[in-house]
Every structure is written in C-alpha cells, then in structure tokens.
Amino acid sequence: MLLEIGFIHGYTTGTHKLYTHEGTDTIIALPPSRPGELARPIHIVAIRRQVIDRGLVDEDEFDRLLEQAQHVTAQEQEQRALAPLSPAHP
C-alpha cells in the first residue's frame, strides 16, 4: 500500500521495515511481519494519520487502498491454506 503512494521500501539495521517518501521526508518504520500480513491496527492508525496529514492521500483514498490491501492479503492467505503440501522425498 505504501509503495503505491510513492514510498520506497528498505530496512533498518535491526529487523524493522523502513518506508521513506522522499518528496515529503516522511519515514515510517514497521516491526517485522510475515509475507502478506497487514500491519497491526495501531500501526495502520499511525500510517493513516501521517499520509493524510502529509497530503499524500485523502481519507477516502486511504480507505480504498487499505480495503484493497486487505482483499489481496485475504486472497494470499487463502492460497497458502489451499496449496498442496509438497510431496515427501524418499
């Protein structure tokens, strides 16, 4: 979602993910998560506030992007759950 509005993904020296938006000097650091997992609700609230306050998106656009991300995440989780287990090697 952040990449869609111009953030660049990177990492800190620790385990956190770092997202930077050069045009507005906005920096967002998020704790590690599993692939396809959304940020925790408290982080989503903070992200929402930052990107709206910085004028990167309005409230409706943020909600649309979040809904889209949730839909994609749900599909990814469903695909992983339905994926057949790899055959055992003799």
Image (tube, rainbow, N blue to C red):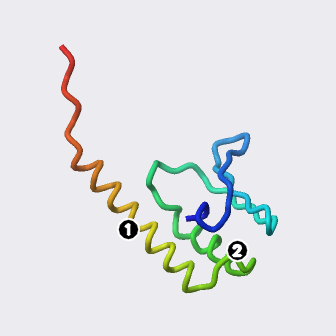
* Residue carrying label 2: 50
For the residues marked 2 and 1, what is the alpha-carbon distance in whole angstroms? 23 Å
The reply, left or right, for residue 3 in relation to residue 79 is right
Q: In the image, residue 37 lies at what x, y percent?
A: 45, 56
Give the SS element for disc 2.
Answer: helix
Mark 1, secondary structure of its residue: helix
Q: Specify the quadrant that holds the C terminus.
A: top left
Amino acid bearing label 1: His
Q: Kindly identify the residue that appears in the image at 80 percent across and 69 percent down.
A: 24
- Residue 46 in percent (x, y) is at 65, 72
Residue visible at 49% across and 72% down in the picture: 66
| Residue found farthest to the top | 90
Q: Which residue is mark 1?
A: 71
Q: Which of the two residues, 55 or 45, is positioned nearer the viewer here?
A: 55
Q: Nearer the viewer, mark 2 or mark 1?
A: 1
Is 83 rendered above or below residue 29? above
Which image quarter: residue 75? bottom left
Q: Is residue 15 positioned above or below 1 on the image? A: above
